[in-house]
Image: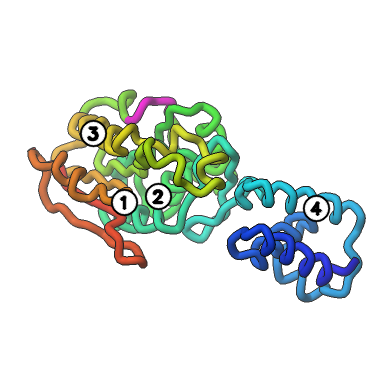
Amino acid sequence: MTLQTALLQGTQLLEEASVPVPRLTAEVLLSHALQHDRSYLYAHSDDELTERAWIHYGRYLHERLKGKPTQYITGCQEFYGREFRVTRDVLIPRPETEHLVEAAIARIRPSQRALDVGTGSGAIAVSLALETQAQVYATDLSLPALCVATWNARKLGVAVSFIASDLASALADQSIDVLVSNPPYVPKSDQAGLQREVRDWEPEVALFGGDTGLEVYRRLVDDARRVLRRGGWLLVELGYNSLQPVRAMLASGWSESEVKYDLAGLPRVLAVRWTP
């Protein structure tokens, strides 16, 4: 079987199962089986697929047809122009979260202290450390997630201080200049309606923000009031319909509120300054 035939057959299987972007998914899985980039598929389309590669490709297709996200099959996801390792212990970084990174970079000054709360794969923290001259700290409640984040920081050659902590509880008072977080914000009541790739595979602790999706925001705002220095910034990624409720939590002691919208025109990032 040639690479071209394998690609066509894989695409057809995924398409019949209503897997999104079947052609691209087949390309990524076949490339992963061959341990080459996607351009290799077209430069060598008439090459015969080895038995070893066929076995791996077949397994990857089977896993994807069962709902396993492609990123968990390949073990990687691109974020802010870099490749990050991902496992089922961490949320898969989304392109929309890059808006949060951009907003934070614009507010971080050299030698300041930045904190990423709920770091997961470390994508936000590592990106901030690479793009700024800040001292970057990152917390997570999950030890397996911290292991993934530490691996990513080492792979990309950057120093980030990872801390096992429930939100920012382990940080000292008035010790941080910029606090960034993509917290769990999906209401638990929405669980049944999520895509199976999300519902059945990604870690619940990184997805669900309580019954309303706002519980973690409330605790995060309380922590931010304690750990931020006067004039420091809090930046959070927003969930669907969470802008106004989160703004209401920031009515006292905060100023310079700014909302950043994503490419779909939805409010994605809220930035506020701590000025008690």
Residue type highlighted by circle 3: Arg
**Res 218 label:** 3
Residue type highlighted by circle 4: Gly
For label 4, the residue is 58
Dot 1 alpha-carbon crowd within 10 angstroms: few under 14, some 14 to 19, many 20 or more: few
| Residue 135 in view of the camera | no
Q: Measuring from the top left, give residue 264's x and y in whole percent.
A: 35, 66
Nearest the eye: 125 or 239 = 239
For label 2, the residue is 128
Going from the N terminus, do you reach mark 4 or mark 2 first?
Answer: 4
The C terminus is located in which quarter? top left
Q: Measuring from the top left, give residue 127's x and y in whole percent.
A: 44, 51
Left or right of 158 on screen, residue 211: left
> Quick check: marks 4 and 2 in contact, CB under 8 Å?
no
Q: Which stretch did the figure color magenta?
A: 163-167
How many angstroms separate mark 4 from mark 1 (CA)? Answer: 37 Å
Going from the N terminus, do you reach mark 4 or mark 3 first?
Answer: 4
Instruction: Specify the quadrant of the image occupied by residue 228.
Output: top left
For label 1, the residue is 240
